Amino acid sequence: MASDLRRALAEGVVDALGFVIGALIGWQVGKALGYDVLASAGADTRNALGWILLLAGCGAGKWASLRWRAWQAAKRGADEGGGGGGGSGAARPRK
């Protein structure tokens, strides 16, 4: 039970980090392109494009965290002798 809890907590932390780091990268890309979400108080096109870049960064960070977890599960499975990966179904890479 403790191992399942530890695994679930690790997955949650990795997902959260991917989400937040992706959001920060998306925000900085938008800021570099002149689409800063914090620059203006009103709703305009530049602000909307900034939000789109920020949200795209969130999605990309979440995707990257899922791919990293799948890579770790595959690596762990290879180290254990080629078993099934030993993780949840979401952590295994799809073919």
Image (cartoon, helix red, strand yellow):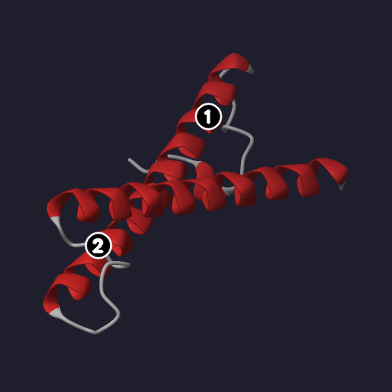
65 above or below 36?
A: above
Please tell me in which quadrant of the rendered image residue 66 appears: top left
Which of 26 and 31 lies nearest the eye of the viewer?
A: 31
Disc 2 to disc 1, C-alpha distance: 35 Å
Q: Residue furthest bottom?
A: 43
Amino acid type assigned to the residue bearing label 1 in the image: Gln
Point out the residue furthest to the front here: 40
- Residue 57 % position (x, y): 31, 54
Residue 31 in percent (x, y) is at 23, 54
Instruction: Specify the quadrant that holds the C terminus.
Output: top left
Residue at image location 37% in from the left, 57% down from the top: 58
What residue sits right under mark 1 in the picture? 72
Dot 2, crowdedness within 10 Å: few (<14), some or many (≥20)?
many
In the picture provided, is 94 more to the left or to the right than 78? left
Q: Residue at coordinates 87% horizontally, 44% vertically from top-left?
A: 2
Q: Residues within 10 Å of mark 1 (few under 14, many from 20)?
A: some
Instruction: Assign a secondary structure to mark 2.
Output: loop
Of residues 58 and 34, the one nearer the viewer is 34
Q: How many numbered marks are there?
A: 2
Q: Type of residue at label 2?
A: Asp
In the shown orientation, is residue 95 left or right of residue 80?
left
- Mark drawn on residue 30: none
Of residues 12 and 44, the one nearer the viewer is: 44
Q: Quadrant of residue 27?
A: bottom left
Answer with left or right where residue 84 lies relative to residue 59. Answer: right
The residue that mark 2 highlights is 36
N-terminal-most mark, 2 or 1? 2
